[in-house]
Image (tube, rainbow, N blue to C red):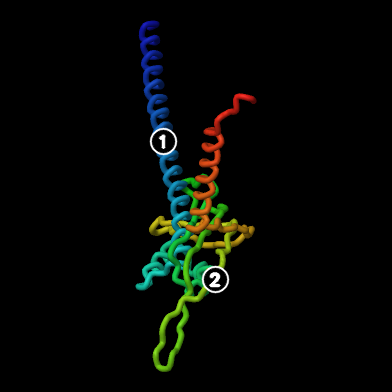
Amino acid sequence: MAAKGTAGVKAARGVLYVLLCIVAVIIVVGLVILAYNTAMNTMTVNMLTKDAFTKRAQAVLLPSADGSDRIMLERLFAPKVISTDEMLNSRYYENFEISNYYERADVEFHIVWPWDDSVTLNVTEIVRDINGKRMVEVADGEEVTMTEVDEKPLPWKNGVYSVTLKKDPVTGSWRVNELGLIEPLLIVDDPEPTLAAQDQAAQTAAAQTDAAQAGSAVPTSPLQ
């Protein structure tokens, strides 16, 4: 009887051990899936937010002729954001032919869990060094020509934004649902050195080098 009882206890312990192993494996697999989905959601929201601000600046400064940029904006922003955003509805830069600019959007790190359907984070947007020329129509009798005006485009309205993104329950895609300015930032563009200034700097450096070499080549007097 004692042997049978001991065997029963060993069998029960064996079954319990197997069950505990199965539970541990399930927990580990669940944690791995949770970590993976959380990382994917966090990365997706971060990249989409950066892309949204990049496309926003591009649509204003370098709009496409076929309107494809507006279609892209509708995928990234809710209609109410497109209709109320000051920069997207400004027509100021349409008077310029923008050649290039610098844009950066720093997105605040925020963990996005798999069950989250809305997230709010801060974004610091900087658009600077906007280079372009303004062209105006000049009428000479019946002939109309485009003439360049000596006028530089005004700086971009940089700032820190509060951005709320929401996930579509059907497609699972994220989109900017709210966009509000928290704090404006004053960014001064870096002036590009002109060729004349570069030549002057090179000539000054060469003159200093020649003077130093001439000074070292002067012979020393025996009386000194």
Q: Which mark is residue 21?
A: none
Q: Give the image quarter of residue 75.
A: bottom left
Q: On the rendered structure, is 186 left or right of 55? A: right
Amino acid marked by disc 2: Thr
* Residue corresponding to mark 1: 32
Foreground tag (1 vs 2): 2
For the residue pair 133 and 101, the one nearer the viewer reads as 133
Between the residue at mark 1 and the residue at mark 2, the CA separation in whole angstroms equals 41 Å
Q: Is residue 162 above or below residue 39?
A: below
* Residue corresponding to mark 2: 84
Q: Secondary structure at mark 1?
A: helix
Q: Residue at x 57, y 60 (%)?
A: 158
For the residue pair 19 and 223, the one nearer the viewer reads as 223
Check whether the beta carbons of the residues at disc 1 and disc 2 lie within 8 A of each other.
no
The residue carrying pointer 1 sits among few (fewer than 14), some (14 to 19) or many (20 or more) residues within 10 Å by Cα, namely few
Is residue 164 in sight in this rendering? no
Most extreme residue toward the bottom, as rendered?
141
Is residue 76 in sight in this rendering? yes
Q: Residue at x 53, y 72 (%)?
A: 151
Q: Position of residue 136 (x, y in %)?
A: 47, 80
Q: Position of residue 224 (x, y in %)?
A: 64, 25
Q: Is residue 130 above or below residue 141?
A: above
